[in-house]
Amino acid sequence: MLKKISTIPFKDTAEQAAKLDAVIAECTPDVSKLMHVMQEAQGIYGYLPFEVQQKIADGMKVPLEKVYGVATFYAQFALSPKGKYAISVCLGTACYVKGAQELLDELSAQLGIGAEECTADGKFSLTACRCIGACGLAPVITVNDDVYGKITAADIAGILAKYQD
Amino acid sequence: MYRSHVLVCGGTGCTSSNSQKIIETMEAEIKAKGLENEVQVIRTGCFGLCALGPIMIVYPEGCFYSEVKVEDVPEIVEEHLLKGRMVKRLLYTETVTPTEIKGLNDTNFYKTQHRVALKNCGVINPEDINEYIAYDGYQALAKCLTELTPEQVIQIVKDSGLRGRGGGGFPTGLKWSFTAANKADQKYVVCNADEGDPGAFMDRSVLEGDPHCIIEAMAICGYATGATEGYVYVRAEYPIAVARLQIAINQAKELGLLGKNIFGSGFDFDLHIKLGAGAFVCGEETALMTSIEGNRGEPRPRPPYPAVKGLFGKPTTENNVETFANIPPIIRKGADWFASMGTEKSKGTKVFALGGKIKNTGLVEVPMGTTLRDVIYEIGGGIPGGKAFKAAQTGGPSGGCIPASLMDTPIDYDNLTAIGCMMGSGGLIVMDEDNCMVDIAKFFLDFTVDESCGKCTPCRVGTKRLLEMLDKITEGKATLEDLDKLEELCHYIKDNSLCGLGQTAPNPVLATLKFFRDEYVAHVVDKKCPAGVCKSLLSFSIEADKCKGCTLCAKKCPVGAISGKVKEAHTIDTTKCIKCGVCMDSCRFNAIIKK
């Protein structure tokens, strides 16, 4: 999947930087822990901006190209920030045959953004994800940690209305 | 001692429909009634009947409540736990007959199932090692370490006839013997829990419901092959499974069932969890190992096979979760017991994740050789809404489909291969007359194009070209000659790709071409999609005699393509229509048809 690279300027806090430093220090020089460090970094920042990738590369003494290579290889790593409410539409087979594509189209129409994009106010982001394993509830969407199963396109407006604050 | 036990499913399906809140409410209500020393609430792994979640079983009665809501909990506590009267309206309807309440194992969903790998799922608390031990846990490891030589362990696994449950079906005992035969200062055991096949959740359910059986099996494999370290590579998308596995590893270490000198035998074994990050190709064994080493998960050419040069360049045995889950019972009950189940060349049972257009979506385990008809109609409860069965998809993006005409084929490795399908890891997606098979093939190709790692050209470029051809077909722009080219390219990709992902990527196309060629032809020659799925080939129209002129569709149409006077038949302007189908959904007189 082509990843959208963020153009939003990178900001971090001293607290975030200290956390990342600690993770890097704990795992260096074991290069096999690179993915683990990147997963932790994404937990700290919500995504992996170039500045963070550079810091990991320098800290673990691996080429930036390798960090970038891993970041773009795995679906889990995001190169642009997620919205306050991250919406994922499961496009696993079970959800797909039960109409998940229609849910994605409806969300896209109502939010005015495509998959892998974030609304201008930073409130909602939309992702088409692979099977989350809740096939018994197909079709499924998640909004942050809330799961909505067995829904239709008609339910979308009502779900979005819950996240207006 | 408790007089009553309430088992609440804490699998991903039921957790998604709020079972955690149900447990918390239940515990609070029980406390409020002063029953906390009499009734115990236990969060278990998956019961299997995910369609009816959240699920709850109350023992000793064994009564099975389905689709329980948080609001129902006070009633269950008050009526059932305090006064001893079952809450009939919440009982699983299959268990209720006019005269009696049937046991769960007498219902259609459970009666033909035979649980080996899922034995403890939905039965024990997966976060308590003592419950696993009470169900014979770690006996098999003790038997291996104290009574059997590594060679004897391998012989038992060989004799059992167990084959890899990840999809390939390679004999497990043989795989172990290859690693055992290689001398090295360090060997590894790897458990493949990177269940990337969309629509499959067997491995996740085992890890969530019975994590200790995987730990025990990996230690046994370590002993048999001479490895002292193991890795479980599990998807980061499975947070519950990861958390429970970590708890289980910690508990096993505390009791000395992992670590140094296990059972005083001098055998050391340590286990690590490695989180995947969402890459389908990492289900391929060499790609998985490359990923554990911290790299992009690209596959390596074989040979050398992992048994010679695997993880970190050392001899490695890799098996999938379900394969490992079969090991402890085989050691405990013997090879003959295991080999007594199944067909001639496929022994034991197989777990399937039933999904798609089927009533009882969920997790089932049946002996090898059970027919698809039994799985879908007996256990699965058939197709909802009175629709006709069209095909079942097995093996996900690497697999094929089984059409209605072959429903009585006994399911095992060789039979499925013979009909051009594959067992796969166990995802079984049911499709009905409303699903277009060309669209399904396109869906899987779209997936493989996304997930191709890009290392070898046949897969990277070939799958992309396949997808473009399928696009052309679903848009009505293809010719019959394109169908031949499509097939030719499929065989080229199969023969020339580096790893399993590319070699199997064309399977969904080949299988649908084989069994549903008429649907392809309809798209190409008649420019029609018989199932009414492919939008470019659809047209909507209004049947004048059914239309009452209520104007609802005209109001709902987002592009103003519908016109007509009140109380007179309306018409659709097909040049404006964007085929969204809103009119059809809103019409109360079934006057709108799509063709």
Image (cartoon, coloured by chain):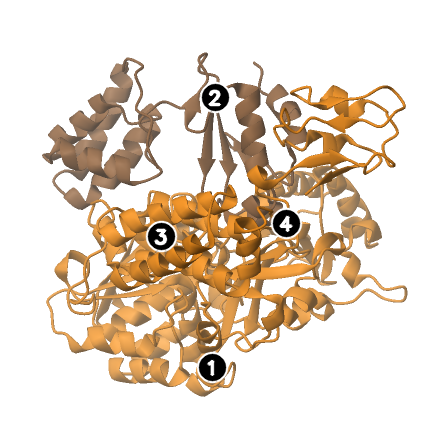
Chain colours: A brown, B orange
Location of residue B328 with respect to B37 vertically, above or below: below
Position of A108 with respect to B538 (left or right) is: left
Question: How many residues crowd around disc 1 within 10 Å: few (fewer than 14), some, or many (20 or more)?
Answer: many
- The answer to whether marks 3 and 2 mark residues whose Cβ atoms lie closer than 8 Å is no
Viewer-proximal residue among B294 and A151: A151
In this figure, which residue is indicated by the disc labeled 3? B250
Query: Foreground mark, 3 or 2?
Result: 2
Give percent across and percent down for residue A80.
34, 24
* Residue B404: numbered disc: none
Label 1 sits on a secondary structure element that is helix
Q: Report the chain holding disc 3.
A: B
Viewer-proximal residue among B587 and B521: B521
In this figure, which residue is indicated by the disc labeled 1? B338
- The answer to whether marks 2 and 1 mark residues whose Cβ atoms lie closer than 8 Å is no
Q: Amino acid at mark 1?
A: Phe
Location of residue B412 with respect to B278 vertically, above or below: below
- The answer to whether marks 2 and 4 mark residues whose Cβ atoms lie closer than 8 Å is no
* Pointer 3 or 4: first along the chain: 3
Q: Amino acid at mark 3?
A: Asn
Residue displayed at 30% across by 71% down: B221
Q: Amino acid at mark 4?
A: Ala
Q: How many marks?
A: 4
How far is the residue under mark 2 from the one under mark 4? Answer: 30 Å
Question: How many residues crowd around disc 2 within 10 Å: few (fewer than 14), some, or many (20 or more)?
Answer: some
* Pointer 1 or 4: first along the chain: 1
In this figure, which residue is indicated by the disc labeled 4? B531
How far is the residue under mark 3 from the one under mark 4? Answer: 52 Å
